[in-house]
Amino acid sequence: MQTINQPLGMAIIGLGEYGAGELLPALEHTSYCRLAGLVSGDPAKLDKYAKQYKIDSSNCYSYETFGRIAENKNIDIVYIALPNSMHLEFTLRAAKAGKHIICEKPMACSVEECHEMIAAVEKAGVRFSMGYRLHFDPFNQEMMRLGQHEQFGAIEKMLLQDSHVIEPGVWRLNRDLAGGGPLVNNGIYCIQAAMYITGKLPVAVEAKFAPVTDAEKFSEVEEGINWTMYFRDGIIAECETNYSKEQNVMRVDAQEGWFELGPAYEYRELKGRTSKGDMHFGPANQQTRQMDDFARCIIEDLPTRVPAEMGLRDMEIITAIYESAKTGKRIKLELGEYITLPES
């Protein structure tokens, strides 16, 4: 167990829309960690946010100077909020520097990269956690409880849809940076939900690419994809993600009722209903709760509920979904037995 006299220092790597717009404000409300450093490839952003959050220049790094973070005792954790193709590089560099790591989803751009990241983290003896914020959201935790404990009887089917209209020219439309389209960005939340609602692993997937309506915009990544996840006990999850639609649904039909979220995957203002009435939870910052939880895991020597193995597992499923969409075949899954249960 690590003994500390103050919260753990965290550096945010990547000062784009998510890093600067969500993570930096969320850190101001944490109890077990604090903002201690900034990393960006954009000098203007470094200067702007260093001044705004009163971070000394000695705790600011470019991508080129990032290796020097190993000498900085003020920084215990790094949060990688970079384009997907950069997750591998900065996980390896952070592990070598001896820093604990939170990595945004997806973990990497391939199963092989995930294995490489896990090996590096294990060799360095640092901790790693996925940036799966919905595991810390009260509404999604309630969906876990209702499903895993069969509060409305055995689950029969799920409808999981997470889509948004994407603007042209953003990095997520670049395959080299994103590694895929809406499946790795939005669809991964549907994949996650199917498993954390049931507490079970899928045994097969079947998928089909959506028709392309803008060939120029979607010349490198899929515009949309529909897929079905099959579970051993007959449960099915019908899923959809698309960069040309607005969808935000998590619906579960069980033998004795139903429960749903809509919006389901947003950062805030989620709404939940069941066949017995509405869900009621007060405001909760998902990112604040997520970062505090990981800091506590380090301080108290506890396992994170969203470990690297979960990121690897999800990339295995994503790979199978793409294979099914390309071949038109149902793909069987052989996944590890790791499942994270909700808090009791």
Image (cartoon, rainbow, N blue to C red):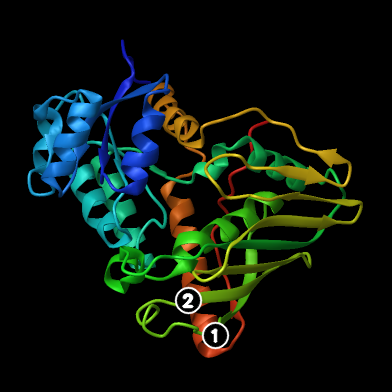
Give percent across and percent down for residue 61.
Answer: 12, 39
Q: Residue furthest right?
A: 256
In the rendering, at what x and y percent does residue 148 appear? 74, 46
The amino acid marked with disc number 1 is Pro
Furthest residue toward top:
5
Count residues near mark 1 (Cα–Cα under 10 Å), then give few for <14, some for 14-19, many for 20+. Answer: few
Up-down relation of residue 155 to residue 35 (above or below): below
| Mark 2 or mark 1: whose residue is earlier in sequence | 1
* Observer-nearest of 68 and 178: 178
Q: Is residue 171 left or right of residue 182?
A: left
Q: Is residue 311 left or right of residue 156?
A: left
Give the answer, above or below, for where 273 lies relative to 161.
above
Please tell me which residue is depicted at 37% across the width and 24% down the height of the picture: 28
Q: Residue at x 41, y 57 (%)?
A: 106
Q: CA distance from mark 2 to mark 1?
A: 8 Å
Q: Residue at x 44, y 58 (%)?
A: 312
Horizontal side of 115 relative to 98 (left or right) equals: right
Q: Secondary structure at mark 1?
A: loop
Disc 1 designates what residue?
211
Decide: few, some or many residues near mark 2? Use Cα within 10 Å; few <14, some 14-19, many ≥20.
Answer: many
Instruction: Report if the CB atoms under discs 2 and 1 are less than 8 Å apart.
Output: yes
Q: Secondary structure at mark 2?
A: loop
